[in-house]
Amino acid sequence: MADILYIVVPCYNEEEVLPETARRLRQKLEALIAAQQISTASRVLLVNDGSRDGTWGIITKLHQECTLFSGVDLSRNRGHQNALLAGLMTARERCDMAISMDADLQDDIDAVDAMLEQYYAGCDVVYGVRSARKKDTFFKRVTAEGFYRLMNFMGAETVFNHADYRLLSRRALDGLAQFKEVNLFLRGIVPMVGYRSAVVEYERGERFAGESKYPLGKMLSFAMEGITSLSVKPIRYITLLGFFIFLVSILMLIWSVVRWAGGDTVSGWASMICSVWAIGGLILLCLGVIGEYIGKIYLETKGRPRFLIREILEDGHGETDR
Ligand code: UDP
Ligand code: MG
């Protein structure tokens, strides 16, 4: 018998796109069920991440109209990563594999076929990788490219051009459930889960409607979040930087002693002030980076829940099918 697939879609203020996304997802699921690729207990799991518009109303309606739609309503807005985790952890107890996907139709739904193929070939993780970013703005492309490079340089290894469009088997989901960190960065965590993985290429489309919830500021903090939650390399770079600056100061000292011995006094107010400011700035910067890690430790020790679920909408049909 075919396996149960859950498609997990986090939604934050997506009332404009959701009806169309749901229509296409339903079409896809129905086709896959008809082809006996997946079980009839398969579902689209829509996670409402504390939307302030009519998103939850739409999800409720979809659920009432069609048993293929389930819904999870979070207690408040917790951000994309936590909403996704909430959906995956809910799906985990109900499915054999879960595919996570954005609500805005930027992820090509047809890539699901190729992902399933890899899954049935024995892969536990299938990464959706963007082959083309033609539809993204030039700015978004450049910043995204910089993002991956920076991440890898800083020791947070991620799959290039892979966002959060991926398939996870039940086994991989169980593995993921054991990563308890509050500062969650799925793109970095999933490769750490391991198991057999494959890559499926797809063309990333344009946002169907509504606007991106990731403006530049949020993207930068996402990058910072990703790096500091996955790697301690920045602290090591700071140590190297400190060592280098110390070395330079020794050389300068030697140089001035030599000049002094030669009867030459070193003058210069500007160079003094500049270096004092430069070093002061660097010290503050380094303290900031270290502070970032201490903040992370602080948050992790609290062990707060990453999401709270207000309500789950589902019908019991799936149960009889198992
Ligand atoms: N999203 C969410 N919570 C948030 C912000 C975004 O669940 O606080 C969802 C959003 O509804 C979408 C996905 O995360 O399904 C990706 O967001 P978006 O398309 O705005 O990001 P972009 O594609 O521009 O990076
Ligand atoms: Mg998007």
Image: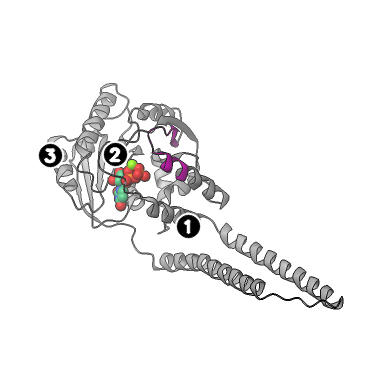
Horizontally, residue 255 falls left or right of residue 176, namely: right
Residue 217: x %, y % from top left: 39, 55
Residue 112: x %, y % from top left: 36, 30
The answer to whether one can see residue 179 in this image is no
Q: Quadrant of the N terminus?
A: top left
Does 84 appear above or below 278? above
* 2 vs 3, front mark: 2
State the residue position of label 3. Answer: 64
Considering the numbered disc 2 on the image, is that residue within a helix, a strand or a loop?
loop
Tell whether circle 1 marks a residue whose Cβ is less than 8 angstroms from ligand 1.
no
Answer with the quarter of the image where residue 250 lies. Answer: bottom right
Mark 2: few/some/many CA within 10 Å (<14, 14-19, 20+): many
State the residue position of label 1. Answer: 229
Tell whether circle 3 marks a residue whose Cβ is less than 8 angstroms from ligand 1.
no
Residue type at numbered disc 1 = Ser
**Figure quarter occupied by ligand 2:** top left
Asked whether the residues under the numbered discs 2 and 1 touch, taking CB atoms below 8 Å apart as contact, a structural biologist would say: no
